[in-house]
Amino acid sequence: MRFPPRSRPATWATTAESRDEILARIDRPPLRTRVKTTHEGRRYGARKILSWLESFPGTTWQERWQASPANLLGLQWTDPVMAWLTERGESARKEGLRAGLLCLCVADVIRPDLEFLLRVIQNRHWREAVVKHRDPAGFARLEEAADPVVLPSRPGLKACTQIALIVLAKGGGVGDITVGDCIELRQTEARNLKKGGDSRFLFYALLKDMGQFPPDAPSTLRALTVFSGQLTPAELVDRYQLACRPVRDLIVDYLSERQPALDYASFEDLAGVLALHFWKNLETHHPGIASLHDRDAAMDWKERLRTKVSRRRMPDGTTVEVTTPRASYASLLGYVRAFYLDIAQWALEDPARWGPWAVPSPISANEISYKKDIRRRKARMDQRTRERLPVLPVLVSAAEKCLHEARIRKEALRATPGGHSFTVLGVTFTKATRSSRLDSSGSTCAYDESGRRHSFTQDEHRAFWGWAAIEFLRHTGVRIEEMLETSHHSITQYTLPTTGELIPLLQIAPSKTDEERLLVVSPELADVLSAIVSRVRDASGAIPLAPFYDGLEKIWNPPAPLLFQWTSGGQRRAVSSKSIRKALNEILRSTGLTDAAGQPLHYQPHDFRRIFTTEAIMNGMPPHITQLILGHKDINTTMGYKAVYPEEAINGHRASIARRRALRPSEEYRTPTDEEWNEFLGHFERRKVALGDCGRAYGTICQHEHSCVRCPVLRVDPAQRHRLEEIRNTLTDRITEAEHEGWLGEAEGLRVSLAATESKLAQLDERQGQATSISLGIPTFREIAGRTATLPTGNPATGTT
C-alpha cells in the first residue's frame, strides 16, 4: 500500500502505569478541569473502569481493555461494567462511567478501536476534551491554517471530531497523523456509517492545508477512497471470476497488448466485452468449456447476444422481465471478431505465445455490417432532435423560472428566524432551528405542512447549475465532460489585426479526440459565463482551485480554477455530471413535456450537441466550419449529428426553381408598365362568359371566334346548365328547319355545335358524379397537421410573440 496507516504499538508509557499513578495524573492539570462536578465525575468513572479492567488478564491497561468485551459492544460497553459493580455491591452510574472512559482515552491510558470510537463519540465533549487536554498546540496550528469561516461551522466541527478520533485511536498528536490514518478512518466510516459520507472529507483537506502531509500526497481524500482509478488488465478481468484459467490469462495478455493504443474508457469497454459478454457468458451456459474453437457454442452465444433481459417495475409494484433487442449487437460481435483476428495475426509474429490459440473466427465479416445499425441509430437520433428542438425554448424558460423561484424561497428562508413559519410562492414552511451548512443566517432547511424536509440551499444550487448547463451546452455544442473541465483560464480573447477589435473566445480542452479548439463567445454565452464567474469566485475575487476527477480516464487532474465548482462539506468540489443530470431532470419535470408516445420527455446533455449542430447548419453555417467547432475529425460525423427536416427538400426545390429562372431572358422579369398590368388584370375580367369561364392563355386570340360552346377550354358553370339545355333545344329546332329548307351547309355547322353542346352536358354530369365523396378512413389534412411540431417564435422569457 502506498500510504499505509500507523500500527498501534503493543505498549507505551501511560498504559503501563499503575492505578495510583493514573489517578494522580487525572488530579493534575491539564487533565483536571476547573469545574468540580465534572472532575469528580470523570475521576469516579475512571476509578471504577480501572477496577473492572483489573479483573481481566494482561500486563497493561490496553491489554486488559482488549481482553474485555467492551471493545466489541459499542454503546452497550457499560452493561458488563454495571453488572460487575452491582455484584460487588458498589455504586454504578452510567454517566459517570462514560465520563471516566473519556478521561482514560484523553490521558492515553487506553486506545480503543476506530469502530468503537465511531459508535461512542456522539457529543462535543470528546472533541473539546481532546482539543484542550491532549494536544492544544496541534489544534491551534490547525486553526491558524484553516479558513476562519469553515472551521467554526458544523462541517468544520465534524472534521475536528474526526481528527480527535484519530488521535485517540492511534496515539500521538495532530502532527503525527498520516495519510494512511485518514484513509483507514474513511474506510471504517464507510463500513459503519449509513449516511453523511459526502461531508466527511473536510478533515483531510484541513490537515493538508496546514502542511501535515508530504508533497506526493493526493490533493483530496476522495481520490483514494471514493474513486478506484485505473485498473490493470488482470484486475479488470478478475472482476468477473472466470473459471478457465488459461482463457483468463489469454484475455489478460491480449488486453495488455491492446492497452497502449486505446484510451482507458475504450480499454475498459473492451475488457468488459471479452471477459463478461463473451467468455463469462459461454462459461455460464456451457460449463467446463476451455476452447475458443467450439462452433456450436459460438452459434448459441451469438443467438443469446441478440437480445437482453431487463427488469422493470410496474405501477402496481411488481417487477417483470422484459426482453428487448440489443442495440450494440453488431458492435459486440466486432470486438470478438477483432480478438480472433488479432490472435491469428500475432501468431505469425510470435508462434510460441499466440500460436496455440489461433483458430478461425466464428464471426464472419457479413455479420458485423454496421450500415443498417448506423442508419437505425441515425433515424433514432434524428427523431430525438426533432422532438426536442421545437420545445427547447420551453425548457430554457422553465430553467429560468426554476432558478428565479429557488432564489425567492432561499431569500425568504434567510429572512426568517429559526423555528418560525413563513409563506413563499403560496406554500407555507417552518424553518429548522439547527444549522447544518455554512450559513450565518442559521439553518438552510425547512419543513412544509406535510412534514417533508426541504434544503433550499441545495435546491438553489441545482437550479443554478441546471440553468447554467443548459445555456452553456446549447450555445457551445460541447460535450458534458468538456463543459465540466472548462476553467477560468479557458476564457481568452483575440485581437483582429485589421480593426483591432477584441473577440472573446472560449478554449475547449482536449477531450474525446485529444484536440483543443476555440469557440467565439456570443453575447448570450458571455452572460452565462459572467454569472458563473460571479458565483464561484471567493472573497478575494479569484476563482479557487478545485481538483477534478476524469470519469472516463479514471484519473485525478491537478487542481484548476474550474468554472463548474461549488462548496460541499466545507471544501471546493467540481460539479459532477450526475449532479448536472439530476438538475436537468428536475427542470424537465416542472415543464410537463412529453414525447410522441406520451411519456415524460428526457434530455441528455448530448442532445444539446445535436440540437446545436442542426440549428447551425440549417441557419447557414457551412458544415466544414461546424465540424471545426464541434471538434470532429470527419465531416460525415458532423452531418450525422444534423437532423433531417422535411422543409429542406422544399427549400432545395425552390432554390432550383430560382436558378432555372435565372437562365431565362431578363426582360421577362422586368417591372411591367401600368398599361401592361391593367391589360393583364383585364384578362381575368374578360374570362367570364355566359356559360362559365374561358381558360385560354393570357394574350392569345380566340380561335373559335367566340363560339364558346365549341371551345374545349370553356369551363361550364353548373349553375348555367339550363342555358346549355336551351341552346341544345334551339340547335335541334334550327337543324330541323335547315333540313326542311334545304340549307344543307348550315345544317352541317349546326350539327357540330350540337355535338359540342352534348359533350359539355356530359362533362357536367361527370363532374357532378365525382362530387359525391366516399370516406375511406384516411386521415384528413387537419388530423395530419395536428401531429406536427412547430417551433415557437418570439422571446420565451417575456412571453412575447
Image (cartoon, rainbow, N blue to C red):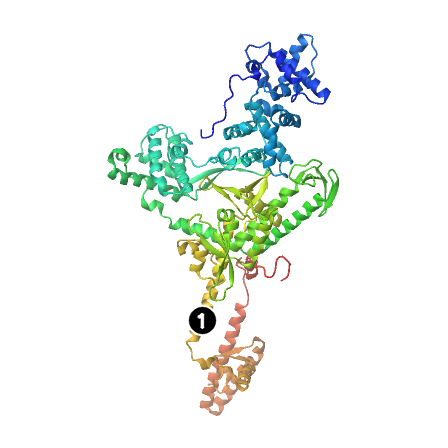
758 above or below 22?
below
Please rate how many residues cluster around mark 1, counting C-alpha atoms within 10 Å: few if below 14, some from 14 to 19, many from 20: few
Give percent across and percent down for residue 784: 54, 58
Provide the residue designation for mark 1: 657
Q: How many marks?
A: 1
Residue 417 image-quadrant placement: top right
Residue 773 in the image: state x and y as whole percent: 54, 64
Residue 601 visible somewhere in the drawing = yes
Front position in the image: 78 or 363: 78
Q: In this picture, is 175 found above or below 537?
A: above
- Residue 202 percent across, percent down from the top left: 57, 35
The residue nearer to you, when weighing 90 against 395, is: 90
701 displayed left or right of 122: left
Q: Quadrant of the N terminus?
A: top left
Indicate the position of residue 516 as horizontal and vertical percent values. Answer: 44, 52
Identify whether 200 is placed above or below 51.
Answer: below
Q: Is residue 593 visible?
A: no
Residue at position x 47%, y 60% in the image: 617
- The C terminus appears in which quarter of the rendering? bottom right
**SS at circle 1:** helix
Mark 1 belongs to which amino acid?
A: Ile
Quadrant hosting residue 456: top right
Residue drawn at the location 58% of the way across and 43% of the way down: 566
Is residue 407 rendered to the left or right of residue 584?
right
